[in-house]
Image: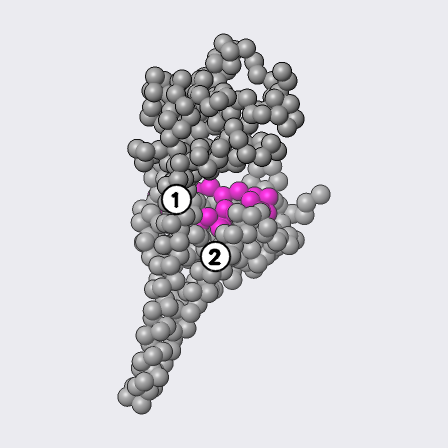
Amino acid sequence: MTTDLPLPERSAADEAAEWLPDGLVAVTAPGLIESVNAVALRITGLTREQVVGAPLEVGLPLRDHEGRAWWEVASPFNGLDTRTGHREKLLYLPSGREVLTTARYVRDGRRGPVVVVLIGLRDGEGRRRAERANAALISTIAHELRSPLTGVKGFSATLLRRWDRFTDEQKRFMIETIEADADRVTRLVTELLDVSRIDARRLTIHARPVDLRVVLGRAVERLVASGGQCTVTTNVGAPEVWADPDRLEQMLSNLLDNAVRHARAHIHLSSRPGPDGTVDICVDDDGPGVPVEQRELVFGKFFHGRSPGSTGLGLYIVRGLAEAQGGSVVLQEAPDGGARVRISLPAGQED
């Protein structure tokens, strides 16, 4: 007898199965479970006595999301002689456990009868965690969008229905609020688009020599124009960096927004030559700082920390933009005891 997949000796197969990271169940014709590894028993919560020697539908009674007995649906030892198995499916045990299941059908010859079915099992917890993370992401996005849109809807509806009852000053205040909320929605959508491009590695970068004196000056001017209450100082020790000027300004804008939320009274921007032909751009604040154990977490998506009013995307985008330009970002302690975000980018034109 020949098979598409040569089977090792029984003892060797059992020993190899125990080293696998996934569960493995071997079923021989006419449908009796011949062996099961320890991982499969842990995933299913069954014992070896319950499984080995039992018919497949009894020893591994899986059902699909419609409640159908899976092995009656799949019918591995019958059906078309061209089938080679099935891809990963989420199935359920009577206990309610979710099991990710794949199968490989080993035939006697190219289109001969199935002689062995090898079933791979994985715990469904990993998928559940991913689904919970996606649900949390959707909930966060919905909340961030709903808040400003509620303001836009409320003020615009009020103005349309009661225009003549408001003074010019009141109308101006409501229109300015609508504009601010619309800007907030636009910024969130832009951030989400940037996140998707970063995740897909599809950021477009147009790097060239950038005068840091100009870029840092503009960043300070925008902060002052926005009504920021912190004093800002700069120290341009390295005048030029190789970067995309628009992306660099976006990074600095995100960092300054973050610094304003945490600073007590002062923010400091600086640049200086770094090691190995780089330039370090630092944004320091005099706020409470960030504990060492959280300094990597803050670069994660939707990490808010002590700033629930933010989208939680700013630092994630800063790191993605820096890495796309051949640089890096780290969070350190500032000289005043607050937080320092240090961006390292190439200095001068690349070879």
Given residues 142 and 234, the one toward you in this image is 142
Residue drawn at 59 percent across, 50 percent down = 202
Q: Residues within 10 Å of mark 2 (few under 14, many from 20)?
A: some
Residue 103: percent from left, percent from top? 51, 30
Q: Magenta segment, which residues?
A: 315-338
Q: Which residue is mark 1?
A: 66
First of labels 2, 1 by sequence position: 1
Q: Which quadrant holds residue 146?
A: bottom left
Q: Is residue 109 visible?
A: yes
Say what secondary structure mark 1 lies in: loop
Between tags 2 and 1, which lies in front? 1
Q: Residue 350, image x and y in percent?
A: 68, 45
Q: Is residue 46 above or below residue 282?
A: above
Q: Residue at x 46, y 41 (%)?
A: 330
- Amino acid type, mark 2: Glu
- Does 151 appear in magenta? no
For residue 108, which quarter of the picture? top right
Residue underneath mark 2: 191
Distance CA(mark 2)–CA(mark 1): 39 Å
Residue 287's spot in the image, x, y percent? 33, 49
Seen in the image, is 32 located left or right of residue 156? right
* Residue visible at 43% across and 55% down in the picture: 256
- Residue 81 placement: quadrant: top right
Give the quadrant of the C terminus.
top right
